[in-house]
Amino acid sequence: MRTLRLVLGDQLTRTISSLRDLNAGEDVVLLVEVSEENTYVRHHKQKIVLVLSAMRHFAAELRAEQIDVDYVYLDSEGNRGSFSGELQRAVERHRPDRIVVTEPGEWRVWQQMQGWSSQLGIPVEIRADDRFLTSRGAFAQWAKGRKHLRMEFFYRDLRRKTGWLMDGEQPVGGQWNFDPQNRKPLRKGLAIPRPMRFAPDPITLEVIQLVGRRFGDHFGDLSDFGWAVNRAHALLALEDFIQNRLPNFGTYQDAMSCSSEVLFHSTLSPYLNIGLLTPSEVCQAALQAYETGMAPLASVEGFLRQILGWREYVRGVYWTFMPAYAQSNFFFAQRPLPAFYWTGETEMNCLRHAIQATRRNAYAHHIQRLILTGNFALLAGIEPAQVEEWYLIVYADAFDWVELPNTHGMALFADGGLMASKPYIASGAYIHRMSDYCPNCVYDVKQKLGQNACPFNYLYWNFLLQQELRLRANPRLAIAYQTLQKMPAEQKQQIRHQAQQFLDALSAESW
Ligand code: FAD
Ligand code: DLZ
Ligand code: SF4
């Protein structure tokens, strides 16, 4: 039986389920560069280079194994510009008996796939993506009947299931969570190793030219492309993280600094999300570092929690609740996205720093995404769909299944608390405690009101005032509402007034 095996641009794993029973003498593997995938949002230029160059490298690796690969370039003659159109053409070329593909990461593409068999007139087998440690069905089962889906309980179940960092039924170290030891601001004078970067090879250089030509008006810079685009380099990046940054990962997980864009984070998400690395091998590498005494338990547990916990969990939320999930707007937020999200031109030093770094690198670490751009969008009442599109565009690791729950649920609380037990809101004080942005800002983080006051301060209290009916009963916000209750009416009025003035000026500058 001749099988056409379609591999999507985020499925670049040799052990992916669609290639598992490949018959090298008979089957054809199809990879297609299509304009629809490059423009369904106007992705950061570096994200397009990463995906297309990694696809080309993956194809070359398969060919080196004598596998018959049909590769359609973006500029190939007759390219129909979509998965469905290119599959149709490939069926005409190869006349296969069936098509095999692994389930996609995005609802949008999943819907397209449902129609392929009838459109093409041949069987299409859609296989589970078992690179994840939890299947879509298993998560839905876990979620069934639960009012709130707290990540912590899901994570503990997975620790028990995998046996990772377990001592029989108990967590190693006697705790599931080492948060109190983690999350410190950066210590002065601490050396921060720079992550490994990779000079573009001829394949990547060609893609850089193509992207400059075809998508030159997309967000982001191309001049400093340094991502790994093949598995060998992604493995080097993993090793570099384990040796040089994992030991400090936990302690400084929530720190932010002008002096480093990455700090002790791994920067492995783009490789995990397009398949150059698998989540289990990354977790195993971290566990080994613990076992050999290279990294402390608090860091290794903190890191494992991100991949075994958060990454699996958000994917589960996505597939269990889509497509309705994307539609909710708990706070009825309507404001347009401010222009500075694209330009980085704002007087707020923290936001300027994070957004300009995102333009340069297609990367920001988690706490920048959550507490800077996410928190600001929540406090300012920006419409969720616009914020979500921004997050899907600007990062090299952005794919709907992981971006949407993180933005919609975690950062914006637009799902009304399905994922998070309270909105992640922070005033300037938290940003000041966790970063070194404030001393170099035109605003004064200590001032709550007045021309020089940090906007995060009055926006924070204004948000709590505006959303009082929706949030007052939340026990995790009890202290904030007690403070608000004691606040003089006149001060509340001033907060509302200053916030309104600031927000009106933002709307005026929106695109
Ligand atoms: P590290 O801090 O080194 O963490 C290790 C790994 O854990 C990451 O590589 C990632 O695979 C995983 N991870 C950590 N946190 C999360 C999380 N909350 N959800 C899922 N996986 C997680 N992550 C994406 O991969 N793509 C996105 O589009 C994306 N959008 C986000 C949007 C918002 C508003 C927020 C708050 C978070 C988003 N995240 C997203 C999650 C997280 O911020 C990134 O995974 C992380 O910053 C990537 O950098 P890193 O590889 O250095 O991560
Ligand atoms: C992100 C992306 C881009 C920019 N280009 C392509 C492409 O040309 N061909 C392809 O197969 N995949 C691409 N991708 C990744 C897809 O968008 C991704 O596979 C789907 O969104 C399903 O998750
Ligand atoms: Fe950001 Fe406010 Fe600090 Fe300025 S003062 S860097 S706006 S938190």
Image (tube, rainbow, N blue to C red):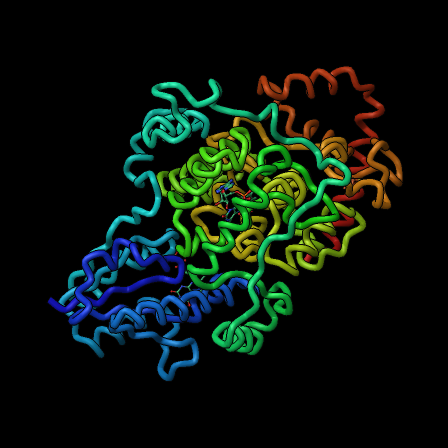
* Residue appearing at x 22%, y 79% in the figure: 93
Furthest toward the front, the residue is 292
In the image, 222 versus 62, the foreground residue is: 62
* Residue appearing at x 36%, y 43% in the figure: 319
How far from the left and from the top, in percent, is residue 65? 27, 69
* Quadrant including the C terminus: bottom right
Q: Does the rendering let one see residue 462?
A: no
> Which image quadrant for residue 156?
top left
How far from the left and from the top, in percent, is residue 305? 47, 34
In the image, 63 versus 55, the foreground residue is: 63
How far from the left and from the top, in percent, is residue 289? 48, 38
Q: In this picture, is 396 found above or below 174?
A: below
How far from the left and from the top, in percent, is residue 449? 85, 33
Furthest toward the right, the residue is 451
* Residue appearing at x 26%, y 68% in the figure: 29
Q: Is residue 420 left or right of residue 479?
A: left
In the image, 247 versus 154, the foreground residue is: 247
* Residue appearing at x 46%, y 69% in the figure: 53
Q: In this view, does 402 lie to the left or right of 141?
A: right
Q: Does the rendering let one see residue 218?
A: yes
* Quadrant including the N terminus: bottom left
Q: Is residue 426 left or right of residue 169?
A: right
